[in-house]
Image (cartoon, rainbow, N blue to C red):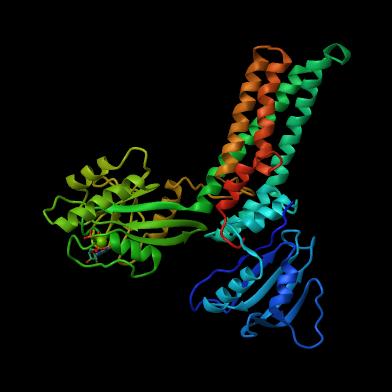
Amino acid sequence: MIDDTIAAVATAVAAGAGSVAIVRLSGPQAEAIGRRLFVAPGPQSWESHRVLYGHVVDPANGERVDEALLLLMRAPRSFTREDVVELHCHGGLICVQRVLELVLAAGARRAGAGEFSQRAFLNGRLDLTRAEAVSELVTARSRRAAQLAMAGLDGGLQHRIGALRERLLDQLAELEARVDFEEDLPPLDAAAVVAELEAVRGALLQLVADAQRGQLLREGLKVAIVGRPNVGKSSLLNRLSRTERAIVTDLPGTTRDLVESELVIQGVPLTLLDTAGIRATDDRVEQLGIARSRAALAAADVALLLFDLEAGWTAADQELREQVPPDVPLLVVGNKADLAAGTARAGATAGPAHPADVCISALSGAGQEQLEQALLRRCGHGGDQGLQVALNRRQRDLAAAAAAALARSLEAAQQQLPWDFWTIDLRAAVRALGEVTGEEVSEAVLDRVFSRFCIGK
Ligand SMILES: Nc1nc2c(ncn2[C@@H]2O[C@H](COP(=O)(O)OP(=O)(O)OP(=O)(O)O)[C@@H](O)[C@H]2O)c(=O)[nH]1
Ligand SMILES: [Mg+2]
């Protein structure tokens, strides 16, 4: 039983930003604390789901701390299914922090990360997949990621995983009955059980594969732009991100540090990294920058190797290409197509003289669209048509574990082992799926899941 009242600022907090900020309380004392701190003039009554107008007042000295609205939502008709009070204060930093301090002084406890959602889950308002979807919706970096989160919030994941788990439970019940009462029951159609386990395993493997695409939409990818000095890496970063983030000059060795820029291409969030041009140099600062370039290359999800089409594909470019770690997908891009003759037109791919996957001009923008397409393809993004729900990492690992357990169960079937050998792994699969939705989940796991949420959610 939860008997304390938690409070936190539920909106983003920044100096001078946002005209309204919300302090949210949840728990048995929420209304009492609200009544202590909030003075509503005139004949306004404290009804559930009604907005009151008034002031937050410091009970110690009667000082008006903020002009605010108060929204009372009595249990169980609230996000947490507890009594909830929201104080809609003025935004920024000062007012809202003072209001929160008063709320804490009046007996509420500062909420931990994800604690409101955790209560909503514990009180049966949300299953675990929906609670996670709330967090994903808040942190979505692209429109598609937000759409997937909304699908999760609508229960798309819970239904799918729940239905697969039910099917396994049906088979488990049949098998376990045979373990105990084989002679009293009609014989079991082993082939039908195997077919059903295969079907569920197939559906799980499909969900795991789709998770990869969802991951991309959700978390985005780190793309490191590398190449020799002066080939136009910084110009390309500026072009793709439509900013003047990086300094561009005609001097080789301009960029010394990593420059990061976030962008969204066709709904996929990407983090672009501009790096120092790689070459042999005696300049100490440049050497340090180049070390960072190499580290960025090693940590990238995709490497974009840029070279100068006017100068052509040189031995130094080839050397760099060989330094790209074999596990980092590579896109070779020829730049300065406006200066190059012949086949190196913007948008064109490899010609006899160069191995470019695509040619562009960072200066004019020609070939940009082809580059973006090629980049998404290299990221493994084959379009997201048909993707309605996507598991997050935690859910994907559990679905994969369930599929693996089913494979072991099917192996026991193939070897015609007794029923109880089938059930061991089948039970493990059921448990893993129960952990996805939260039906079978330990407190430690729950704490880990919710601690990734932001405060106030
Ligand atoms: N004509 C032409 N010039 C370009 C193009 N892209 C970049 N440049 C020029 O090439 C020079 C170098 O560009 P940067 O973007 O600074 O090159 P960089 O690869 O970041 O260079 P470092 O930071 O020194 O490694 C600048 O004078 C740019 O204006 C292009 O597509 N066409
Ligand atoms: Mg540069």
Horizontal side of 287 relative to 387 (left or right) equals: left
Q: Quadrant of residue 181?
A: top right
Q: Is residue 439 visible?
A: yes
Q: In the picture shown, does residue 449 fall above or below 403? A: below
Q: In the picture shown, does residue 415 fall above or below 92? A: above
Q: Quadrant of residue 50?
A: bottom right
Horizontal side of 237 relative to 97 (left or right) equals: left
Residue 396 x %, y %: 58, 40
Q: Residue at x 37, y 59 (%)?
A: 367
Horizontal side of 149 relative to 251 (left or right) equals: right
Q: Residue at x 69, y 32 (%)?
A: 430
Instruction: Give the residue at the far right of this rendering.
Output: 184
Q: Is residue 151 visible?
A: no
Horizontal side of 342 relative to 111 (left or right) equals: left
Q: Residue at x 18, y 61 (%)?
A: 252
Q: Nearer the viewer, residue 433 or 348?
A: 433
Residue 190 x %, y %: 75, 17
Q: In the picture shown, does residue 159 fall above or below 261? A: above
Q: Residue at x 73, y 65 (%)?
A: 29
Instruction: Give the residue at the far front of this rendering.
Output: 60
Residue 128 x %, y %: 67, 48
Instruction: Give the residue at the far bottom of this rendering.
Output: 42
- Quadrant for the C terminus, please: bottom right
Where does ligand 2 appear, by image quarter? bottom left
Q: How many marks?
A: 0
Residue 81 x %, y %: 76, 59
Q: Nearer the viewer, residue 350 or 269?
A: 269
